[in-house]
Amino acid sequence: MNKMNTIHKFHNTADALIHCIQQKNPTFHPPCSAGCFWCCYEPAYASVHEVQHMLEGLTAEQREQVNGALDNWVARAGPLLDTERPDANEYRKLHAPCPLLDATGQCMAYERRPFSCRTFFAMSDPHRCACLHERRHQQYACFNPSLFAESMIQMVLELGGTELDHIGALLWEQLRGSRMETASREKHVLETECAPALQPERSTPESTTTPTPCGAGQQSIP
């Protein structure tokens, strides 16, 4: 199977599950909307294949724009790239926007955004996202990890393994052709014969409760 199709299928599955949760839990109303981009100033992670999928959907002009933004991202985010999964509040102080964020505050790869972005939702006043001194009081949705586990396992199997890191670091590798492995790099490999033992009990939208609010600074990544 084409690896980009595997990523597309995984993202569609995640979107469908979240949509079901929203339909069945009337109290789940994230305030996130177009034009709110403060999460793009926080650490954001993706797999190598997700970054390839995003770049595949960009125009030549957009790729140039992203490539031009990489030097700024490295210069600003650099102090925390040697820290594994740096604290979001500390990262915000660096003013290191995601290289995919354009001058109008829009994500150039929004339709192909990675799983970590698709499952990251603020749960209270968006003003708390915009103001750094209020950021610590914001709460974020934490989904039951088993909700996505089955599709995650299938994705890793189909890809034959993958690596995760800061989106900016992986964009650098793809566009500049040189390795930029940060302290947050994770390698995921799953042997086919091990998969049955790792399969979780199936979790359906009907049995999934409203996402539990997490404390500030916690990313909703299973």
Image: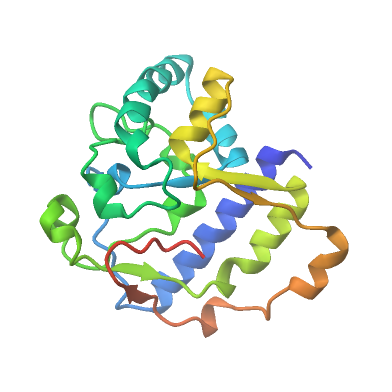
Q: Residue at x 41, y 20 (%)?
A: 62
Q: Residue at x 50, y 48 (%)?
A: 184
Q: Is residue 132 left or right of residue 48?
A: left
Q: Residue at x 39, y 79 (%)?
A: 210
Q: Residue furthest right?
A: 193
Q: Residue at x 15, y 50 (%)?
A: 130
Q: Place residue 152 in its image quadrant.
A: bottom right
Q: Place residue 30 in its image quadrant.
A: bottom left
Q: Place residue 89 in its image quadrant.
A: bottom left
Where does the image place residue 43, in percent across and percent down from the top left? 37, 47
Q: Is residue 14 left or right of residue 161?
A: left
Q: Is residue 9 left or right of residue 127?
A: right
Where does the image place residue 181, in percent across and percent down from the top left? 54, 36
Where does the image place residue 37, in percent across and percent down from the top left? 26, 44
Q: Is residue 157 left or right of residue 4?
A: right
Q: Is residue 150 visible?
A: yes
Q: Is residue 33 visible?
A: no
User: Is residue 132 depicted above or below 177 in this figure?
Assistant: below
Where does the image place residue 129, in percent across and percent down from the top left? 19, 55
Please state which of residues 80 and 59 is positioned toward the viewer in this rendering.
80
Q: Quadrant of the N terminus?
A: top right
